[in-house]
Amino acid sequence: LLSNVSDVYISDPSTSFIPGSLVEGWITAVDIDKERLDMTLKSGKDKKAKSLEDLVEGSVIQANVKSIQAFGVFLSFLGLSGLCHKSEVSDEPFEDLTSAVPAVGTPVKAVILAVDTERKRISLSMKKSHIEAASFGEAMDESSEEDDADVADDADDADEEMAEASGSDDEEPVAMSKANEVDESSAEESFDTDDVPEEPAVKKAGLKVDGGFVFEDDDEDMLQNIPSTAGAAAHDDGHSSDSDGQTAGAGEKGKKSSKEKREKKRAKIEMEREIRNKEEALASSLDTPRTADDFERLLLATPNASLVWLRFMAFHLSLSEMGKARALAERALKRIPPSEERERFNLWLGYINLEAHYGNEGTFRTLFERACLNTNDKELHLKALLALRSKSEIAGYIASRALKKFRGSKKVWIAIGELRFGNHELGTARKVLRDALAVLPKHKHLAVISKFAQLEYKTGSRERGRTMFEGIVGNFPKRVDLWSVYLDMEIRWLRLHREAAAGEGKAGEEEDAASVAGIRRLFERCCALGFLSTKKMRFFLKRFLEFEKAFGDESGVEAVKERAREYVSAKME
């Protein structure tokens, strides 16, 4: 069998095995009546394969790319196979899944998100942020069980604050939790889900620091049995927002609004989960269709599945049958009922993508205007900008149309900024920021400036991005989430610069050392913020320690540990 040819996936065995060559294998079964042997050429490592019950959610694994589908990537590890949905492939946006995933057979790292023993399915994530978070959690897993309970409470509070932050586009963004990552559906509702940690809601029961800052076993005795600090939570709560009057109004109206936002958030996540389950079930139940008849039979079983219709359209395009692909899209729009809003939206987006690549500008504009009348036009503008950024003329048309209809939306301005930065139009991108600040209300300025500062770090000027962040944290020093994003951008730049400057010699080493010193000073500024609660201080100290281990030296590591001990001693007094 093809699955027994090698430890890694091989699509064409003839390229790896020459007839007459000597190979070593294992006999797995013997059929005396048919005089047949079943063999495997695997190395025997799969004898140690785990069962689904042995897998631990949140653990990091080494896997191999087994196959790449339109909805995600199948990975094989330890004799098992799991699916990494396309929304969990990368932190960075991408147009084509094949460009974001290594070739079939390539070893990769992944995190186990969920294990369904009943349906025998494993959900995985290849996002770098998830892998780093999982690795960091394993490395720092010396905290007590009481600490773990505190972190669980923080995650629950973070979910509620994320729900408040992801309401209508007119609300001011709320800080997001780095430890509590959310899926791609929430990325549109916040100004950065990749980098921004949430400022967790403060519990009213008092502040506990039991078992915190356990960096070594010999430090544990000193750090245990620290009394709770009465009133610290109340003190921290008093500083949870800035003094510039940006806090939302209290009262029954505010409570009702927060509840509605949470319900909207949960409904959106549940909808995305249902779509993912449908795609996984569709992928596992049927083989890949190879002819038009195969697709027709598949459509009889799943007539409302936009994924099947889109794959059928791609099949016709592969045969240069543009007319048939268009006719199929029109047929699908008539077939899928209006109640299936998400499926129809996916179909409209695929149809627009088809016209953008194979039609002309006139047919594209006609179809795009028609689509805006029949689906969520604001979301369609945002998704189309992301998918068609390589088509400069079409993307420019969508951007100008979006600004005319949604001029007061910060999401639209940010999407256009990402488009301009992605195409390296730096002057135009910076003009977009100036125009956005002139149009948007003041309570939306902070989210827009923060996002554009991150884009400067990624594709523009680091110095300009640093200047923007210094202005932000200077005006809003109590926004812990903004400090954390600033740190993320500096560390990310340092990591990429170190990889790129590996062969520059002494000049590269000097710039690298200067960057390390600058980030160390930034960490020290964060740890010197007098209003930080114990948990927020622990968050920064743990990140500081990880930074010193990755980019610093032993003296830096010891300095962070000593700072932690001094902080704990001060809390005990």
Image (cartoon, helix red, strand yellow):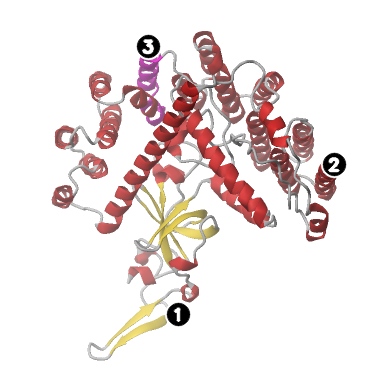
Identify the disc placed on residue 404.
Answer: 3
Principal secondary structure, stretch drawn in magenta: helix
Relative to the observer, which residue lies in front, 143 or 25?
Answer: 143
Q: Quickly name the residue at label 1.
A: 24
SS at badge 1: loop
Q: Quadrant of the N terminus?
A: bottom left
Q: How many residues crowd mark 1 within 10 Å: few (<14), some (14–19), many (20+)?
A: few
Q: Position of residue 120 (x, y in %)?
A: 37, 63
- Indicate the secondary structure of the residue bearing disc 2: helix
Mark 2 or 3, closer to the camera:
2
Q: CA distance from mark 2 to mark 1?
A: 65 Å
Q: Which mark is residue 137?
A: none
Q: Which residue is mark 2?
A: 570
**Which quarter of the rendering shows the C terminus?**
top right
- Looking at the image, tell me whether mark 2 or mark 3 is earlier in sequence order: 3
Is 372 located above or below residue 200 in the figure?
A: above
Residue 153 appears anywhere in the view: yes
User: In the image, what residue type sits under mark 1?
Assistant: Glu
Q: Residue at x 81, y 56 (%)?
A: 219
